[in-house]
Amino acid sequence: MKDLSGTGVRGDLMLTEEMIINIGPQHPSTHGVLRLIINLNGEIIKSTKPVIGYLHRGMEKLAESRSYYQYLPMVDRIDYLSSFFNLASFCYAVESIAELKIPRRAEYIRVITMEFNRISSHLMWLASFLLDLGATSPLFYAFREREEIIKLFENLTGARMMYNYYCFGGVKRDLPEGWIKQAQDLCKKMPKLFDEYEAIITNNPIFLERTKNIGILTPEKGIEYGITGPNLRASGVDMDLRKTNNYSVYNEFDFNSCLAYNGDSYDRYAVRIAEMRESIKIIEQAIEKLPGGSPEKLKIKRANCGCKNENCEYCGYDSQLVAKRVNLVAFKPPKGEATSYVESSRGITLCYVQSDGTQKPYRVKWRTPSFSAVQILPELINNRPYSDLMAIFGSLDVVLPEVDR
Amino acid sequence: MSNLEDKIVQNMGENPAIFGKLLLNNSIEIQSSVFSSDKTEIICISHENLLKTVDFLKHHIETRFDILFSVTASDKFEFFEVIYHLYSSILKHKVIVKTILDKINPEIHSLTGFYQAADWHERETYDLLGIKFLNHPDLRRILLPDDWKGYPLRKNYIMNDERLIWNRR
Amino acid sequence: MKIIFTAIDFVYNWARSNSIWPLTFATSCCGIEMISTSAASFDIARFGAEVFRATPRQADLMITAGTVTHRMAPALVRLYEQMPEPKYVLAMGACAVTGGMFENDSYNVVRGVDRLIPVDVYLPGCPPRPEALLDALIQLQKKIKTETLMERKKYLEQHKPKLKLPDQNSEIMLPMNEMGIFTWGIQPDSYDLNNLELTRKTVGDKCVKFGR
């Protein structure tokens, strides 16, 4: 027999009634390149072995040969659907090491962009989950909203997908004129548009049959495997980093964290739809309370006021965009290490940076939430029929570049 | 090895904070306890005491660290440094645990008995840095192809795998 | 005779170029822009490429959108070999053209898809806008319209992968002896049912050997 010891496939099963099937790296779902080696007995799945590493680009090693500022555009590409969250976690870690204080206007702009990014990431998840289950029209509905949000981001940063907008100490440039009005109009329109596709999905008998009581994740198992984010909140555990460890300015907003109690695929869907609506609330509050107001108003008031007083609302520290002009070429944070935890759209993203006083980071480590979700997949689909595989895997919201980095 | 320990204690200083004091009161020895740049406590222990320390931290009523966020390692030039990030979903606090390993034969106990999440994280650390975890159920490469030569995240890594022929100019 | 052929060529090429069926090969970020192109705002269906096939046996065009790593390369070449003639490849995004931002010092990225398979159209961008993908598709349609039936052999020879990969990888699906599943292009020499060993020989000696 061929030597199978390094591959993870059980050779003693090759001569039995069970069949080894390979769902290869290229497959019609849109989650990315993941390979599953499945043991099937008829239609029931007996065991699974996920094989990852088809998109391992070496992001952690590349950080060691680039300066901090040169590494920022690469950080976007770790999880391209929530690239503002990755930028935020790297920026918070480096700002902890270098002891930079961020002005409040920059924090508010960061929160607004992060929440819009959460909505667009959940819309992409919705489109691909329902496409895997066989429904093709929610793709077009979800992409209609997603294109609106991406147009907003294109006006702000210049790019459709990989934004590269934050820098150490704040954000790079101010909101353009008319952006706030566009954002407010979009926030008024969106709840009605969400109602449109909830009407065709939420009470749909086919969808209920395929997702109710399927892939139940108990809270104890979720905590053992390190699962965070909407996957864990759908099982009843109230862990939302925006409420518990107040990073950034989230403690000034009034919103609820969304919970469900069954832990099946239907609950994971419901939690994400509810989170989208909560994000709209946060954005509306942030736009109202933005320090300095809209950019047109800020320009006029600054010109009129001109007092250079620290506490003035329009000329003071809090209405600036960047803490102090960081010299990008010779940026040398002191020796130290820091971790930053950010609640991104899939879970908790952890960025651990070690610096040794030179221009380049010494070690960067990314812990991404999809890594744990792929690890728990074999437990959830054990002894289930083959057709439940996509209903469970789609509801876990896995994005493969995040797993492989 | 004691030469290394002296150097570390000199660099970081003796300053046991909350979790460090708790561990010392319950007669588990630690080497030092410092704070990182973002005010998280870092507990440095020796690798023989790892299982006792993690057992205490997971089950004691004042700590209850039930989530292991990540297992990672870093290649300082004279030694390896293994770093564990722990979080408590009940009491909402976090801590970092660090140990130091030899460069010649880096081996440490695996935490798969306590946390199932450690399984794949330790496989990834073995894959990229070559640190062996004892009593791990299935220690093999996860991100790189199975027959890759070398451990990329080490500082003295040379790219000498066969597949790199494809990239020749 | 040649007049008849040019008329047939015109109709044949027109029919082929206006109904290209792409293969979904989205590895990375460019895949999302590919899906955006097929959604309602930038419709790819008006150019005939509405049907994205999941299996290579029914596809004409492979849009390699995304980074290709050393582990993914055997799968890519195998997919290319499984597509039936006439087939085309569109390298989308900076990572597929030259390796992109990982070209300098990444240890696991293949510097451009054209080190593995022959490419017809290159499309730079990181990621390219959906309108740029549509422009590349139109360029490909123009290229198809200039082909002739009389020179089909020349095209067949150009459409071979550049590397034949050795077969002892664990990334390729293991063949089962009793069911007689073979990989395309490679024939078994003999079976020995007592030993259950499969001895095989490769096609010709055009493989690149990797010995040191």
Image (spheres, grey):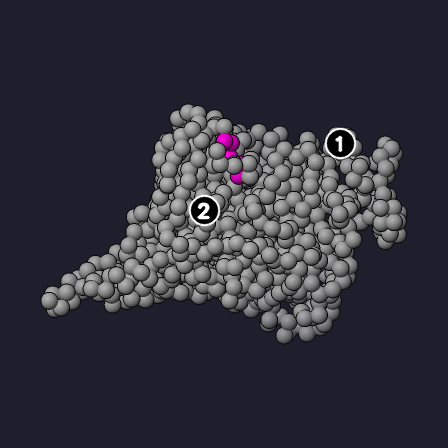
Per the image, the residue denoted by label 2 is: C167
The amino acid marked with disc number 2 is Asp
The front one of C194 and C152 is C194
Q: Position of residue A142 (x, y in %)?
A: 41, 49
Nearer the viewer's eye, disc 2 or disc 1? 2
The front one of B151 and A153 is B151
Q: Is residue A294 magenta?
A: no
Q: Position of residue A391 (x, y in %)?
A: 44, 35
Q: Secondary structure at mark 2?
A: loop
The front one of A3 and A39 is A3
Magenta stretch secondary structure, dominant = loop
Give the label on residue B55, or none: 1
- Side of A181 where B93 appears, left or right: right
- The residue stretch that appears in magenta: A7-11
Q: Position of residue C27 (x, y in %)?
A: 46, 52
Q: Chain of mark 1?
A: B
Q: Is residue C208 visible?
A: yes
